Amino acid sequence: RAALSAALAAMWQPIETAPRDGAWVLLAREFEWSTPGWWAEDNSEGDWYELNNHPSDSWGGPLAGVSHWMPLPTPPGEK
C-alpha cells in the first residue's frame, strides 16, 4: 500500500506544467482537495474550472489556489 501511495504522489505535477488546451485533468490544491477540471481562456489570463462549472455560469467561478495536476486515468475497457 505504501508503494502505491508513493507512486500516485509522484504523478502529481506542478500546475505550471499543466496543459492549457481545454483538456480535462485532475486538479489539486495541496493538502486540501482534488477534482476533475480544465483550463478556460475566460479573461486575459484564463482560469482553472472544475467539473460542472463554466466561465459563463452565474455561480461558482474559477478555482483558487490550484497547485498541482495529473492526467485523468484511462477509463476501464479502453486501451
Image: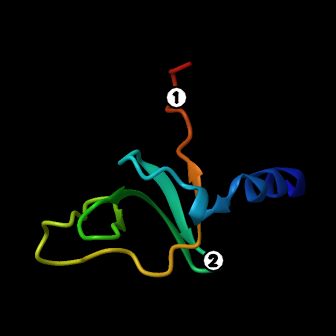
Secondary structure at badge 1 equals loop
- Disc 2 is placed on an element classified as loop
Toward the viewer: 77 or 22? 22
Q: Nearer the viewer, residue 68 or 17?
A: 17
User: Residue 60: x, y in percent?
Assistant: 23, 77
Residue 36 in the image: x percent, y percent?
A: 43, 56
Closer to us: mark 2 or mark 1? 2
**Image spot of residue 72 (x, y percent):** 53, 44
Residue at 42 percent of width and 81 percent of height: 64
Quadrant (top left/top right/bottom left/bottom right) for the C terminus:
top right
**Residue identified by numbered label 1:** 76
Q: Earlier in the sequence, mark 2 or mark 1?
A: 2
How far apart, in angstroms, are the residues tagged by discs 2 and 1? 28 Å
Residue 8 location in percent, x, y? 74, 53
Local packing at callout 2 (Cα closer than 10 Å; few below 14, some 14-19, many 20+) is few
Tell me which amino acid carries mark 2. Answer: Glu
Query: In the picture shown, does residue 64 fall above or below 48?
Result: below
Position of the N terminus, as image quadrant, is bottom right
Find residue 44 and name its label: none
Q: Is residue 34 left or right of 63 when viewed as pictured?
A: right
Q: Residue furthest front?
A: 44
Residue at x-position 52% and y-position 28%: 76
What residue is drawn where x is 88% and y is 58%? Answer: 2
Q: Quadrant of residue 6?
A: bottom right
Q: Residue lying farthest right?
A: 3
Mark 2 vs 1: CB contact within 8 A: no
Name the residue rendered at 32%, 74% in the picture. Answer: 62
Q: Which mark is residue 30?
A: 2
